[in-house]
Image (spheres, helix red, strand yellow):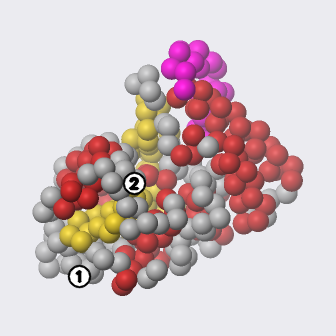
Amino acid sequence: MTAGRHEVHGLAEPGRCGVRSGTAAPFLSVITVTLNDGPGLRRTWESLIRQSWTDFDWLVIDGGSQDGTLGFLSGITHPSLRWVSEPDHGIYDAMNKGTSMAHGRYLLYLNAGDDLVDADSLATVHQKIGDCGEPELLYGGANYRFADESIWYRAPRPIEKAIRHSVPGVHQATFFMRRVLDEPAYDLTYGISGDYFISARCYLKGARAGYLDRAICNFYIGGISTKRANRSLLECWRIQRDVLRMGRVARLQSAVRRFIAHRLIFGRHRFPRLGQFIDFLPRISRKFLDR
């Protein structure tokens, strides 16, 4: 379905930044996908509305929520918002819709429930993008937030070293220049690890990356990638084989490392007491968790 066939709601004019009037297009489009997560969507919105830097618009792609989400969106009069509500084929199909609607030079995929760390998060990102000469990718840091209220910082890593194992940075803290993305951006055969796929595609294109070693977003452990760890492992194996063309030995090494990382993260989410044990492990455990 093309962007022109969506019934788009909101006050922002297509092709214009709703926050800073008179601008032909926003610097950044923030794309949020959601389904029946009204409280999470509100948390995401509250983190956006408090930003000190405002040259962005907010695109919400709702999968047909029945929990009051549409009432919440309809009640927002802020001109930065555009939103659609219709059935889709999962998270990455919704992200593809948002990408097709976006007019920002850079895109951020910040799903319902995810939030920015503080009021200066986007201002810091904008400054860093300029300092780096407007790279095609900017990987920021993220805070892993666990059920026991502990927080682990996940720093971005150089794409040349990280990509043969995992994403260089958490997806919710990754800023993509619009022109570097494929059309569609996400391959729907990777229903869990689409974030890994898109970074792998950008790497193969020779996209230039910048890095911001600062927490940009909060990543709450318990999402789809941690709940379906086994499927994520299989999809990463396929991406390494079919996209990155890695050999079997390298894929096996990565799979073992990823398996350990998933089990530690998922175990801490399911059993908070496990976190007390993990905190006493050597630094090598944190290397595994820094996936």
With respect to residue 217, does 207 lie above or below? below
Residues drawn in magenta = 270-291
Percent x, y of residue 103: 34, 76
- Magenta includes 273? yes
Which part of the image, by quadrant, shows the C terminus?
top right
| In the foreground, 290 or 94 | 94
Magenta: main secondary structure equals: helix
Badge 1 local density, few (<14 within 10 Å), some, or many (20+)?
some
**Amino acid, disc 1:** Ala
Can residue 94 be seen in this snapshot?
Answer: yes
Q: Which residue sits at x=56%, y=57%? A: 195
Percent x, y of residue 22: 14, 79
The residue singled out by tag 1 in the image is 24
Helix, strand or loop status at disc 2: loop
Q: Which mark is residue 35?
A: 2
Q: Is residue 145 left or right of residue 257?
A: left
| In the foreground, 185 or 76 | 76
Q: Is residue 159 left or right of residue 49?
A: right
With respect to residue 277, does 188 lie above or below? below
Query: Nearer the observer, disc 2 or disc 1?
Result: 2
